[in-house]
Amino acid sequence: MHRHVRVILLSLALLVLSPASIASASVTGWQRVDVTLNAEQTGSLLMVSGTLADSARLPAKVELSVPAGSKLEWIGEILGGPASEDPQVETTKRTVNGSDVYAFTLAKSRKAQVEVTAASSLPFDGSLYTPSVTWRSTEAVPEVRMSVRVPEGASVATAVAGAVMQPSDHGYALYVKSFKDVKAGDVVELAFAYRLTGATTGATPASGQAASGGITGPLIAVVVVLGAIVLVFASRGKRPAAAEDERPAQDGTAVARTEGDGVDELPNPAAERARFKRRVATGVVIVLVIGAGLLIGRMNTGAKTTGDTISETFSAGEPCATATFTISPQPGANPGATAESLFSALRPLTGLNTGTYDFKTSTLVVGYCESQSSEPTLRQALEKTGLLGQGAAAQ
């Protein structure tokens, strides 16, 4: 009798411990999950990536989830180099509470990513774009970072509390919000509205602010010199004739002496002074226009701070390669001063597009054209600053 009871209890235990429960017990949890939506009107791509803690051992069994029914485009390990070298992985899929869960093993990297076709395209009402992304966590995660890719220079019309605009690459920016201590079953969402305010190539993210670079002094000097030149030319116009060059006519009209017998009537001195004032006013307007143009041009190409990053556009266009450098700033150094030292060392080089200094992670990412520059050239220039740490990877 007791033997039958033990058999029944064992059978019940096996039913409760389903294969999914047994598998989940050996799964390594993520330290952070990134959910990124590349929203386009012609079709959108959702990317969900997970990063393990540095202490996690490899190989590690992991899981990544996406909305149920999403079309799988790619899933694999992220090595940090060229995307073409990232290896795909073999997976098994199950559907749980509206999510497709992909299980696989990480062998070479502590980061993995799954890419699926998003369910809907980017909504647009003729004025505002309204992207939104929703994701359900199937496990407890210390941090989930959600982001939506937007054209660089987009202006956020309906902001989300806690969300910030961060620079990305290839003419885009990311609108990002982080969620802490996400529990299994929690749903996180990012929805907002933005508009395009004009040309976006090389523009600044809406939340960008100019980094401290000391550009006011040089601009004032340039404007003062241009103003002086304009005023000198303006003052060379015809002045009212001197008193000794005038003699009163019999009818009281001012006339001037000439070498001939004729007499020329002089313009009204008050009218001449009015003309002179108009010339000066015109010169001042020209100076202001030139100064404003210089200031706007400098603001569009100078260094800008967005969140934890300081970026600068060296030249227009999309970089065909990037190099990432580890930076070792002086203890207590101002991030803006550190960024300026790095960018100053890079500005004389040719073929550079962008530079982004992340002062939270102490890394510098430089976008460049391989036909005009190279990673060793960049490193050589940066070594002169004394700020270059160990490690660099071309992408």
Image: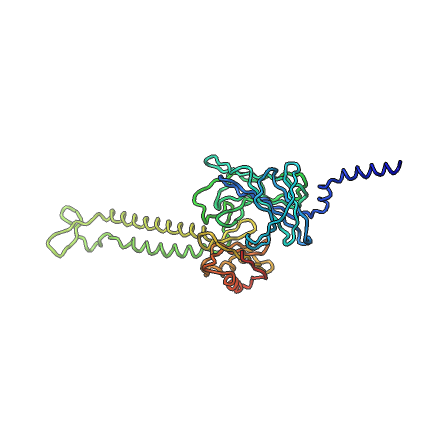
Q: Looking at the picture, how far across and down is residue 162, in whole percent?
A: 58, 43
Q: Residue at x 52, y 38 (%)?
A: 121
391 versus 17 height, above or below: below
Q: Looking at the picture, how far across and down is residue 32, in whole percent?
A: 64, 47
Nearer-the-camera pick, 193 or 122:
122
Nearer-the-camera pick, 160 or 102:
102
Q: How many marks?
A: 0
Q: Residue furthest right?
A: 1
Q: Residue furthest top?
A: 125
The quarter of the picture where residue 335 lies is bottom right
Q: Looking at the picture, how far across and down is residue 203, in whole percent?
A: 46, 48
The quarter of the picture where residue 183 lies is top right
Q: Looking at the picture, how far across and down is residue 222, in whole percent?
A: 39, 56
**Colour scheme in the image?**
rainbow
Nearer-the-camera pick, 207 or 375:
375
Q: Residue at x 30, y 48 (%)?
A: 278
Residue 371 visible to an observer of this rendering? yes
Q: Quadrant of the N terminus?
A: top right
Nearer-the-camera pick, 190 or 250:
190
Residue 163 visible to an observer of this rendering? no
